[in-house]
Amino acid sequence: MQKQHEHIDGLEIKKLVYEGFGLGNGDEKSKTVFVRKAYPGDVVNVELFKRKRANGWANVLEVVKPSPSRVEPRCVHFKECGGCPWQGLEYSEQLRWKQTIIQEVLDSVGKLNVKIEPVLPSGDTFGFRNKVELSFEADEQGHPFLGFHKQGSHWEVLNISMCPIQTEIAQRAMKLIQDFFAQTTLPVYESRDNSGFLKSFTIRYSFYTGKLLFGILTNMGNFPEFDDLGNLLKKELGDTFAGILWFIEKQEKGKATTRVIQAQKGDDFLEEQVNGMLFTIPATAFFQTNSQQAEQLAKVTLDFADLQADDTLIDVYCGSGFFTLQGAMKCKSATGIELEPELILMAEQNAIKNSISNATFLTGNSRPVLKTFVLNEKTFSVCIIDPPRSGLIPKVVTRIAALAPKRIVYVSCNPVTFARDCQLFAEEGYHLKKVQPVDMFPQTYHCEVVGLLER
């Protein structure tokens, strides 16, 4: 069993690695040490919280000699919070290390012989997020509060008073919500035994309309305070208030978890504009969290797609039509596939809203939908894929290849699964030609990757 409070002093951080850790050469027991919130050039004293074989994982106890690239974090919660681990690093260095890490992943995981482009920076590095998801916890007096999980914990929640990557109006709303719940004794949900009530709270913001949409998720139970909360937000925020929804999450052993709307005040959606196109965003739907940088992401993706007037586009994992509809403006026809019916409905409404008539949307799992296309000998000249972090299963890769697209544009937030899948596409004759990282997530190690594959 590992000893408690095991320290290593004077550890020099050599580089940053995937998942954002600073890497240093440790002692005989932990030859390689991965350190949270430590940056190249730092000399630190650390405390290990995990050891596996010859590797150790540690937290910084003291910065003995700071890196020249180290900066003062803006957030007062930086040391304890589990988010924004690179907030103490100059943004130019964040970009440089993101490029280096992505290149290393492509080389080591995918064995891909391609040199990636420098990362496209985010215009705003603070105040850029359009969505924040907060967890409930209770203080010693039993009053609920909202926050993020503490660094390294799945259970402990940090009571927060600010979050500088959110917009100022979202932070103001967060303070109103915190104060409201602090005056109640509503029980906080406990996943261990499915007891309690309050689970999480979501705040969404539209950079186009300047409006806020709120969602509260609870266990089964009564919530008479919902109307008071909605009235408070409407009064204090005025025209900025779009709406608030109360969702109940039902969890029964052996059954799928379901969410149903229990009550609503105001609208259940926001509108956002990207590259001149309007998108309706439902309260629970996925949308790129950096609205302004989403424009850059779309431009890179469509530039790689190089759509011509006679092209036919298929967009797998199309969501609410973000790439499908922008692509449809440039080609003969566009088809989107999405598992969630709500998102397909939004995609169809977005098509109408933007006067697009050459886009078709299909609800279903990508694997059987693609199989049907293959059996019917359907082909598409261009394919865009933007899968979940887990990437693609091999059958999806082979079925996309069977559609015989000239170009495949792969958008991913996970360079590891991106590299793995590009290797699978290589077996089908598609080779990675270009890679353009787009920084959607300043102050973190995360980065969006856009790749072009051609036969």
Image: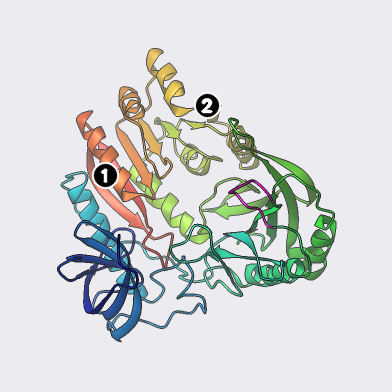
Q: Quadrant of residue 366?
A: top left
| Total count of labels | 2
Its colouring scheme is rainbow
**Disc 2 packing (10 Å; few <14; some 14–19; many ≥20):** some
CA gap, disc 2 and disc 1:
26 Å
Q: Which residue is mark 1?
A: 419
| Residue under the point 36% across and 47% down | 303
334 left or right of 107 in image = right
On residue 159, which mark appears? none
Q: Are marks 2 and 1 in contact (CB under 8 Å)?
A: no
| Residue under the point 44% across and 34% down | 316
| Residue under the point 52% across and 66% down | 128
| Residue under the point 26% across and 59% down | 101
Q: Amino acid at mark 1?
A: Ala
Question: Does the magenta portion include 189?
Answer: yes
453 vs 22, nearest the viewer: 22
Most common SS among magenta residues: loop
Residue 38 vertical placement versus 342 (above, below) = below
Residue 188 vertical placement versus 251 (above, below) = below
**Disc 1 packing (10 Å; few <14; some 14–19; many ≥20):** many
Span highlighted in magenta in the image = 188-195
Q: Tell which residue pokes out farthest to the bottom in this image.
A: 65
Which part of the image, by quadrant, shows the N terminus? bottom left
232 vs 51, nearest the viewer: 51
Q: Which residue is mark 2?
A: 364
Assign a secondary structure to mark 1.
helix
Image coords of residue 234 (percent x, y): 80, 63
Asked whether residue 116 appears in the rendered view, the answer is: no
245 left or right of 438 in image = right
